[in-house]
Amino acid sequence: MSVLKGKHIILGITGGIAAYKSAMLARLLVKAGAEVQPIMTPSAKEFITPLTLSTLTGKPVISEFFTANTGEWHSHVDLGLWADAMVIAPATASTIGKMANGVADNMLVTTYLSAKAPVFVAPAMDLDMMAHPSTVRNIALLRSYGNHIIEPACGELASHLVGKGRMEEPERIVARLEEFFSSSQSLAGLNMVITAGPTYEKLDPVRFIGNYSSGKMGYALAEEAARRGANVTIVSGPVSVSAKNPAINVVKVESAVEMLDATERAYGAADVIIFAAAVADYRPAEMAGQKIKRDGHEPPTLQLVKNPDIAATLGAKKRAGQFAVGFALETDNEMDNAADKLQRKNLDMIVLNSLRDSGAGFGTDTNKITIIDRNGSRTVFDLKHKSEVAADILDHISSLYHK
Ligand code: C5P
């Protein structure tokens, strides 16, 4: 039985000659057991009739914002939430440009902008259009939002020119979707909570105690997890990076106490939780109500109190089926310290970065990690870009979690 059985799939069809292949794609998806809702752009209807699509899928084709004779409004928001996946095949240069830049002048692009589900885009166009810098840039933008691009194949095109631009064959698009939902790296449908960034502990209304964490590692994990289909919530301290994938839910906090509170609220529904934040260990015992003055005053003595350990607090409450991952940033005795934290905080896996490795740790775009799991087994990785490190960490989580 196909993993697509029962899955809700929006099939977006745009106005290119390859639209004739969408009928086959709709048929194969329905055969695999998926519920398929077709959405056509106005120009798609010049290439294939709505009747073909509605007959194959058993659903009325949606194309306009409302049905003219009844005034019934089609909610792009409801559709976007209903979907387990959205597939746009064929995707013309025009639609790709609209998606990349938020030009919501039809039902397809509007639904795309509201969708929280993974999006698959199968471009189809002539080779010169495919190679144009504007198309290349727009496709790169879609990738940066976490969309999956199903690369067009090379071959003879409708213009009789030969080159890259043929829409991928329907069988292979279906295979790609099946792989997305079933591969060992899939996180489809998993609820994931990630803490990220530093915390700021206020001294007075204008000053704080903080640290150099950039949040890049936590956000890279969130982007990659969302791309693999997880429902991701980031509980984020103050950072300058932002989430690109619109499916990521970002909860902004400032202090450790706020971070604990927000993480605790998201924790109940979490299958996997990653503690990637650099939480301040201490906070000022009191916050001054007014700016602390310098003139005519002795230098103040700071009284500090301990912050809650978020990982340890929530690790202690971990229920069966939940998987917790921590980070350890160490300068000495790395392995033992990390293994000790894993036990103390009741984690299932810990990611060690050593400040002795250049290119690892705070602020950099790269990281060098060692993963230690509950059984004490260690895997050492090379220095890599944080997005690749995120993929390694998530591969490791998937393999341990699915065990
Ligand atoms: O004890 P240490 O700070 O080295 O532990 C690091 C791990 O614990 C990280 O995963 C970090 O996000 C988490 N942590 C936390 N709350 C704290 C301190 C650390 O969640 N107050």
Image (cartoon, rainbow, N blue to C red):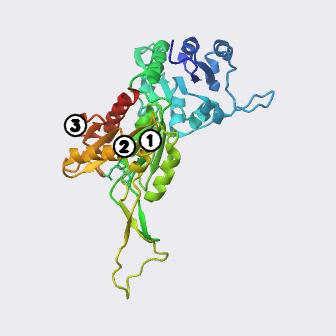
Where does residue 167 sit, x and y in percent of width and height? Answer: 47, 18
**Mark 2 secondary-structure assignment:** loop
Whether ligand 1 has any atom under 8 Å from the Cβ at mark 1 is answered as no
Write down the residue under mark 1. 318
Residue 396 location (% of width, % of height)? 33, 32
Q: Mark 1 Cα within 10 Å, few/some/many (few <14, many 20+)?
A: some
Q: Earlier in the sequence, mark 1 or mark 2?
A: 1
Q: What is the secondary structure assignment of the residue under circle 1?
A: loop
Residue shown at the point (40%, 58%) measured from the top left: 199
Answer above or below: position of 236 versus 188.
below
Please determine whether, in this image, residue 4 is positioned above or below residue 374.
above
Residue 394 versus residue 72: which sits nearer the camera? 394
Left or right relative to 121: residue 67: right
Judge the density around disc 3: few (<14), some (14-19), many (≥20) Cα neighbours within 10 Å.
Answer: few
Front in this rendered view, residue 237 or 286:
286
Q: Gap in Å between the C-alphas at discs 1 and 2?
A: 8 Å
Q: Secondary structure at mark 3?
A: loop
Q: Nearer the viewer, residue 20 or 313?
A: 313
Are dots 1 and 3 in contact, CB under 8 Å? Answer: no
Distance from Cα at disc 1 to Cα at disc 3: 31 Å
Query: Where residue 24 sits in the image (x, y, percent)?
Result: 55, 11
- Residue for badge 3: 382
Indicate which disc, 1 or 3, sits on the residue closer to the N terminus.
1
- Is there a contact, CB below 8 Å, between mark 1 and mark 2? yes
> Would you say residue 358 is visible in this rendering?
no
Residue that label 2 marks? 346
Instruction: Tell me what residue is drawn at x 27 percent, y 50 percent.
Output: 329
Mark 3 or mark 2, earlier in chain: 2
Q: Is residue 196 left or right of residue 29?
A: left
Q: Amino acid at mark 2?
A: Asn
* Amino acid at the residue labelled 1: Lys
* Rendered image quadrant of residue 151: top left
